[in-house]
Amino acid sequence: MISYLTTALAFAAIAASASAQTPQQASPSLQPAITPTALEYTMGEGYEVISQDQRSGPETIFNNRIGGIYYYITIPQTEEWVDEGSFALHGVNNTEQINGMSFDYCSSVPDPLGDGIDIELRFYEETIGFSGVSGWADANNRNEKCGYVIPGLPGDTTLAGLSCWAINLNLAGGFECTLPQEQTLGGMDNFGWSNMYLTASSIGATGPFLGGTSGYGVQDYYELYDLTQPLGSEYQGTFWFGGGPSVQANFPMSLEGNPTDTSAYYSATPGTADSIDLQADVQVRAGQPAAWTVTNPTAGSSYALIASGGSADVPGLVGGQAHLLVNWLGNPLLPVPVVMVGGSYLQLMPNALPPAVHVQAAEYSGALTPSNITAMSNGLRHAN
């Protein structure tokens, strides 16, 4: 591997010389990328060329997706490269919930059907330079916070030698991942993330874009694990690509999430009618406007919002296929459900709020009665 392995003692001297590097001095394993084609990938549904609004967001909570004129082509499917970033300390929860992610890769693997590439993606609560992932025991116990296998992505569908793709991964709907913010303001405690290209091919190669260090907490290095090594010996150390404005050891990606101190939650045993996606448009704060939107409304249906100071998980709606996720009967914050005109609702919040506000949307047809409910949404918890 042409990357340069660095140690804690040597890193300062190497980094000092990095400013003399230029993109032309990059590793031969770096190849020019082409403009990627954007795809939306929804867990359990596969991908499509983007033609509609995503359900992820509405906020961008991390963005290192700047640059990316090269891609790296020699990542074996048995190596895991862990990059890093940080979430700035703010709000009261001290966490961020990821509900969407975007990243880029290129492939020269011939793939006329567009389903030849499998990717494994992981998030880690903490990674430390020259130490690796906190809590990693071995390849079977990596201490990841969240992990996803994303099968059937496209390789070189043009058969012209190279195709590049921008994947917008939608994690809303039960695949969200919650990671910690930094512990002290400005501390930049790093979360980790990695993607492994699992598809082996004797023809062509697949690899991620490389970009600059624009994201909060990003460093010009990454952690390498070789899963062919004996269990417990996979960590190979800290690597970089030799610096330079366009050749940083960082893999561009951005993360989408809910507004500050907002997290989505779901029934432990979801039914087929637990199918409505409810999102908050802004953070919920005392004395300020709040707004919620159903992102996948059904034509001809009506919607209502219910709110409570607590959560629940009560079955029995829509023939047992939908759940009440707020404690509206025991601790209602609204005396009656409020109609969401067109699936949206705007409310000026009172000057005093409980420590947590829980909301959920109900879909119904005709008059708003339990028997006319046709679907229920996820719950949203707003911490204050």
Image (cartoon, rainbow, N blue to C red):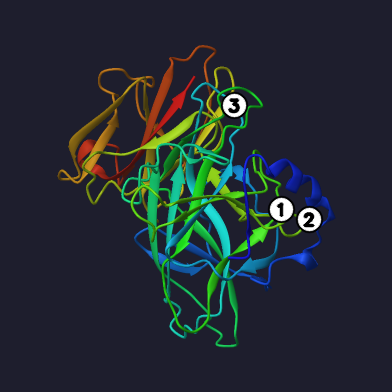
| Quarter of the image that includes the N terminus | bottom right
Please tell me whether mark 3 sits on a helix, a strand or a loop. loop
Please tell me whether mark 1 sits on a helix, a strand or a loop. loop
Q: Left or right: where does residue 210 sit relative to residue 293?
A: right
Residue bearing mark 1: 212
Looking at the image, which residue is at 54% across and 46% down?
256
Q: Earlier in the sequence, mark 1 or mark 3?
A: 3
Residue bearing mark 3: 89
Looking at the image, which residue is at 40% across and 42% down?
136
Residue bearing mark 2: 245
Q: Label 2 amino acid?
A: Pro
Residue 88 picture location, percent across and down: 61, 31
Occupied quadrant, residue 288: top right
Looking at the image, which residue is at 38% across and 54% down?
148
Q: Label 1 amino acid?
A: Gly
Q: Left or right: where does residue 219 sit relative to residue 329?
A: right
